Image (cartoon, coloured by chain):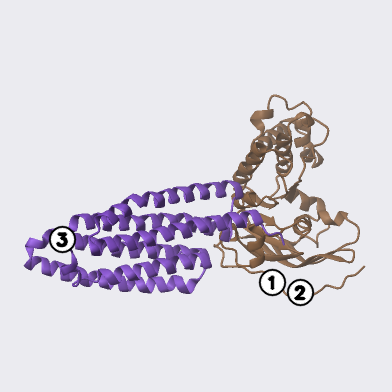
Amino acid sequence: MVVRENYENKLQELKDKIIEMNRLTVSSFEKAFTAFKTQDIELALKVIEEDTAIDNLEAEINQFVVWLMVKEQPVARDLRGIIGALKISSDIERIADFAVNIAKSTIKIGNPQSLLSMTNIEQMKELSIMMLQKAVQAFLDENMVLAKEVAGLDDQVDEYYGETYKRITSYLSEHPEETNQLVQLLFINRYLERTADHITNIAESAAYLIKGRIYDLNP
Amino acid sequence: MGTTVIERKDGVRKSQMKQQSGGTKINVKDLDLFYGDKQALYKVALDIHEKEVTALIGPSGCGKSTFLRSLNRMNDLIDGVKITGDIMIDNENIYETNDVIKLRTKVGMVFQKPNLFPMSIYDNVAYGPRMQGIKSKKELNEIVEESLRGAAIWDEVKDRLKTSALGLSGGQQQRVCIARAIAMKPEIILMDEPTSALDPISTLKVEELIANMKKDYTIVIVTHNMQQAARVSDKTAFFLNGEIIEYDETNNIFSMPKDQRTEDYVTGRFG
């Protein structure tokens, strides 16, 4: 048995980059939310600024994958793995952009505390971070059970999204003077729903790596 | 000579393959092959489809070339070979015929290294047809041109047909070998690592040629180049220790093989 040590090392390097990108994105999400809840504009600006590091990591992963393709001409599981890494890096980058969007909304919204209680935004954020950790872990450990769990959690986020949307729009009709803040809340509600969809894509990439066929976990 | 056929479970895993347009051309069942006491093939079973390219892959000594050579009875030339089982071509058992010449006319072969005769390009290609008794100059001219065109080398050699074939580059010689095989109007062409001695550009030309030849011939190719198998073939059979481990659409073999041993081989983890 020849173990392709060099190639295995390269794959690990690729996985490490995904882990790092994921770590930065979770941190960006947490910061964006803290900024949002405490109206910390400086922290919000920091989230926007730090997104560059995540963008750079995505570009790095793209380049890394291109070189792996050229040099190693991977097939089968190896190929599915690096195609997965490529797609996942793109999804994580998009998720980090939603954290940036939340930071931008924070700057525009003013103090949202009084309105927050009618939304499920806090729970959606907690769920999203849990989903992201599970989806990336499903890919790294080739764990199909985790990938499927992500799909279940996405349904929950969708429900929260629907409820929050209804509550905000009905409140809006009675309180037109708060339109600006409410619209920003609607945006954030939407960002979180989209975040969960991208996380589900990551779980689908993990499922493709594991099973070798396309799963639609987000029908 | 040890002739006991060792019964081994046929571990071939096949998935549902696409319906064939041309149907089965070669049907192999229960093929055991021994070199003296040493068994080289174990209960090989394979359906090779008409006008498709079938690639045989596997590590050195796995039996793929032995299998290829048994398809036109080239192994008959080796002392101490014993073969049991059936190889049917167009529903005829090739080991039950005495007319091996006819078989090899129908089943042509191209080898690893170009093996042209030390004669002109023209005479190389016309050699087979002449042996078959064709004497008409016009007819031979037609066969030579048609064959060289079929092997995508006509334009490169049409002005030097009477010069020595050995003056051509390796890649050109290999294509003349293919032309020489085509000149016999075979139905099946066996290729034993046809590009392993060629440079990358010549390799690509031969691969292009194989893709074009598919419309007229059934091609079986042994290759050590995994990317080549992926590029040129419709079906791939993975051999290991004289057995077929997996036989499937080439796409499946290289994207999601079912057997771990196939996965390990195509991803370069052993072999």
Please name the amino acid that badge 2 sits on: Arg
Q: CA distance from mark 3 to mark 2?
A: 75 Å
**x then y, percent, for residue B206:** 65, 41
Write down the residue under mark 1.
B11
Indicate the amino acid at tag 3: Gln
Q: CA distance from mark 2 to mark 1?
A: 8 Å
- Label 3–label 2 contact, CB within 8 A: no
- Which residue is at 66% across, 29% downward? B156
Residue identifier under label 3: A181
Above or below — where is A15 with respect to A63?
A: below
Residue ID at (26%, 72%): A160
Q: In the figure, what tint was chain B given?
A: brown
Residues at circles 2 and 1 in contact by the CB criterion of under 8 Å: yes
The label number, if any, that marks residue B8 in the structure image: 2
Chain A: colour as depicted? purple
Judged left or right of residue B74, residue A12 is left
